[in-house]
Amino acid sequence: MHIEKSLRDIGLKKYEAAAYLNIFKKGGAEASTIYKEAKIPFGKIYETLGTLESKGLIEIQNTRPKRYEAKKPKFAFNSFFNKKKEHMEIDMHRTRVLTTQIGEELDKIDVKHRNEKILWITAIGDETVELNKHNYEEAKKEICLFICSEYQQNHSNPIHENIPTITIEVIKATLRGVKIKALLSESFARTHVRLSEKYLKSA
């Protein structure tokens, strides 16, 4: 493991990682030594050391001149982790509140829509169910379906595997008054009805 890269990966900046390693390896050092050996610009050394102290990785000895020492790694990095976790949780909560507020504000905006919306969608694999679900939720008047013969014969494809999920969306849409029109084979229709009835009885 490249320790300096690992320090950078957890959030330390280049000069912070270099300064910390220099302090840790020497068991403590003064700023004048650290900036030379760690190759940190003199104008950045005190800012860098102050940041390391605020992150709980080093401590300052009130000597003349001041001496900087690394705290025990086990405790220092556990504390570092907990602080970062706390900050992330606060940030996530703030983001959740803001995204909710943004959604509510956008819903209030009067958006001009076309009188008629024609939507063409092609999906394969796992995308099929998600796109179908979205289309049923967004439908206002009518949904027209066409299922090609390739999918009618293959009972292991996503359409057959997810018929219960699709059926629920169909029911929700029809309850809102959406008309459902479908063009498919008799064999597929029978399979769809049989699997749907089986699911609804077990639900």
Image (tube, rainbow, N blue to C red):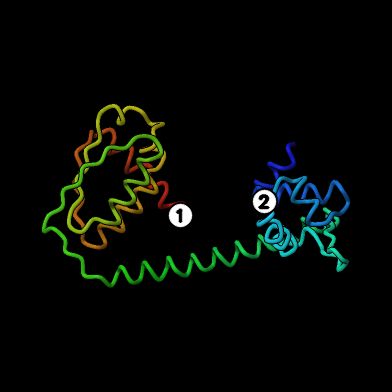
Q: Is residue 122 above or below residue 87?
A: above
Q: How many marks?
A: 2
Residue sitting at 85 percent across and 63 percent down?
65
Give 65 or 196, whichever is nearer the viewer: 65
Task: Report crowding for label 1: few under 14, some 14 to 19, many 20 or more residues within 10 A (C-alpha).
Answer: few
Q: Which of marks 1 and 2 is nearer the N terminus?
A: 2
- Locate residue 103, reporting x and y percent: 36, 67
Q: Is mark 1 on a helix, strand or loop?
A: loop
- Residue at image mark 2: 41
- Locate residue 134, reporting x and y percent: 32, 51
Amino acid type assigned to the residue bearing label 2 in the image? Pro
Circle nearer the viewer, 1 or 2: 2
Residue sitting at 21 percent across and 42 percent down?
120
Amino acid type assigned to the residue bearing label 1 in the image? Ala
Q: What element carries label 2?
A: loop
- Residue at image mark 1: 203
- Locate residue 185, reporting x and y percent: 23, 33
Residue sitting at 66 percent across and 60 percent down?
84
Relative side of 202 to 19, left or right = left
